[in-house]
Amino acid sequence: MPTLDPRPLDAEAVLAWYDRHARDLPWRVPPALRAQGVRPDPYRVWLSEVMLQQTTVAAVRRYFLRFTELWPTVFALAAAPLDSVLREWAGLGYYARARNLHACAQAVVERHGGVFPATAAGLATLPGIGAYTSAAIAAICFDERVAVLDGNLERVLARYHRLEVPVREGKEELRAVLQLSVPQRAGDFAQAMMDLGATVCAPRNAACLLCPLEPGCAAARTADPTAYPVKAAKTDKPIRKGHAYVMRDAGGDVYLRSRPSKGLLAGMSEVPGSDWAAELGAPTYPTAGDWRHHGQVVHMFTHFRLELEVWSATVEPAGVDDGWWVEPQRLGGEALPTLFRKVLAAAGHG
DNA sequence: CATTCGTGGAC
DNA sequence: TGTCCAAGAAT
């Protein structure tokens, strides 16, 4: 593999840009306040970073406000029932994060007296906190001079250095080069680089004229900077098919149950259904009733496409017993992933 | 180390 | 409509 020219970034230029263009985010201490010695609350930074894993700022904002309203401190979150955390997380995706979030809050309270560790190494021992998140919290909250490497930084650095291999193969090299650039204001630098990636050096649009790193950027000297990072070959998604059964009792209540605690949509609520397989089998209704077909729901997961045939019927409650019955107007408060909200909508509970 | 984990928005 | 992809972690 070609070794990168270890040119440090112009961190001063990046920080100067950030001082003028920092985005206003609910979990952020703006650079002017940070300069006055105001420190971010590690609880809020941690919560935001976990929510932001593979998730857009736009999607996170309202969940963050809701969580901090319900649970303003790590003690409050640690004391909350896991069920309520899963319910509030519903719709945000990657539900292992919610379980790890709760486990992490309890670990911070029980093992650290409610105080988050102040180093990346210490943070990385906690559930749901990996290489990126530990570095981000340590830099933002404690100005540890550690390389914070997320998808934005990978893109910016791949362009800056014209990395000719997919990021996965060059990631550690990028990390080493980035480490050489981290200034004293490590937290502002990390946030600046992420803002830069989100707004200036974006995936489909590189606004090089606005970029403080343009003078040293290799891709900016090419016809199309967005050609970097180079992509790995993609594989096509398999299709899985199955049936979903929406049951109502005589009063119109809807039947839900819990999914297993591991695997896809772990621990979330669901409408009963068949296995999901490459070939669609005949429907096997959970119990007797006036079963009627409502068409198909298509849902895209990261690694497969799911096509569910939606059925509904009015049934005798005695026929099923591993779940619970919910009034239709209370479905909104259940820990239902988007997939099953689509199913319920198709069956007339939209 | 490659795979398995969601979802909504931009284009 | 299909494709891409966003402040990754766990296994």
Image (spheres, coloured by chain):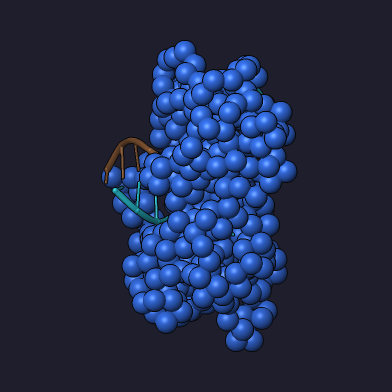
Chain colours: A blue, B brown, C cyan
Of residues A223 and A239, which is closer to you in this image?
A239
Q: Residue at x 36, y 77 (%)?
A: A111
In the rendered view of the protein, which quadrant contains the N terminus of chain A? top left
Q: Is residue A136 left or right of residue A124?
A: right
> Is residue A54 depicted above or below A22 in this figure?
above
Q: Residue at x 42, y 63 (%)?
A: A103
Q: Is residue A125 left or right of residue A29?
A: left
Is residue A202 something that shows in the picture? no
- Judged from this view, the residue extending furthest toward the top is A282
Residue A109 pos. (x, y %): 43, 76
Q: On the image, which quarter does residue A31 sit in?
A: bottom right
Is residue A77 something that shows in the picture? yes
Q: Residue at x 64, y 25 (%)?
A: A314
Residue A141 pos. (x, y %): 51, 76
Residue A40 pos. (x, y %): 58, 77
Q: Residue at x 50, y 70 (%)?
A: A79
In the rendered view of the protein, which quadrant contains the C terminus of chain A? top right
State the count of labels. 0
Of residues A188 and A271, which is closer to you in this image?
A271
Q: On the image, which quarter does residue A281 sit in?
A: top left
Q: On the image, which quarter does residue A64 sit in?
A: bottom right
> Is residue A117 depicted above or below A304 in this figure?
below
Residue B2 pos. (x, y %): 31, 37
Of residues A216 and A265, which is closer to you in this image?
A265
